[in-house]
Image (tube, helix red, strand yellow):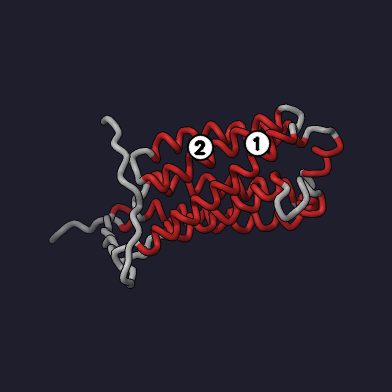
Amino acid sequence: MAQDIPLHEQQYTQPVATNIAGPGPLGLNVLAFLTALVGCFYAGFIIPFEAAAVRPALGVMLFAGGIVLLLAGMWEFRKNYMVTATTFTSYGGFLAALGLIFIPSIGILSPLLAGGALHYTLGLIFLCWTIFVGVLFIGSLRSNASLAATIGVLFLAYLLLTIGQLASNNTTLVVIGGWLAIVCALVAWLAALVSIVSTPSAQGAFRLPLGRRIAVVE
């Protein structure tokens, strides 16, 4: 008679699902949407430049959208797409945290404004994120050109925002960074469109190229 195996030592195998829809288009669209909001806020496009009255609405949108982006990133891990999974998850968490800062009722914004430390605090946060995006950009060179272009412009946008914030909120640098964020959003929306219409399951008479794979020395 076979020896009984304790329940906690039993091994189970879960079948891998192969027909799960990829979350890439969702992640890219949400990334573009939230980055456009950040860009408009700092560029003064449509809404006034760094308008205090806009911060609560912006904070809520960044927080809610950041959660959606984080979830898309988690599903990308399930699909074993490491670069996009890391990008979506980390950017979602970053934007959600940024949204919490901008929501006045949370109680983070008021002390920073009262102490005159808001721009330096944001500059430090943006600096750490910019370094992170630089690492992501190098990793994205092993994927397709549209994703690499999105992350590359995102890096430049936050680099300018970082320098502008640390330079006592230098308006020129911050505005340029905001416009670069808007450009990044447009590139991401294009990448999302390409991803949607180029999937094998997409129905239609046309396909768009993702961009040639960029060769990297092993």
Q: Is residue 193 left or right of residue 121?
A: left
Q: Quadrant of the C terminus?
A: top left
Which residue is rendered at x = 29% and y = 64% of the image? 200
Sequence-first disc among 2 and 1 = 2
Q: What is the distance, in whole Å, between disc 2 and disc 1 at their CAs? A: 13 Å
- Mark 2 Cα within 10 Å, few/some/many (few <14, many 20+)? many
Q: Residue furthest top?
A: 167
Tell me residue 14's x, y (percent): 28, 61
Residue at 46%, 55% (x, y): give it. 190
The residue lying furthest to the left in this view is: 1
Q: Which residue is mark 2?
A: 133
Q: From the image, which quarter does the N terminus lie in? A: bottom left
Residue tagged by mark 1?
161
Most distant residue in the right direction: 114
Residue 36 position in % (x across, y down): 61, 52
Please rate how many residues cluster around mark 1, counting C-alpha atoms within 10 Å: few if below 14, some from 14 to 19, many from 20. Answer: many
Measured as percent of width and height from the top left, residue 65 is found at 60, 57
Q: Residue at x 37, y 64 (%)?
A: 197
Residue at position x 61%, y 48% in the image: 95
On screen, 25 above or below 168? below
Name the element at disc 1.
Answer: helix
Judged from the image, the secondary structure of the residue bearing numbered disc 2 is: helix
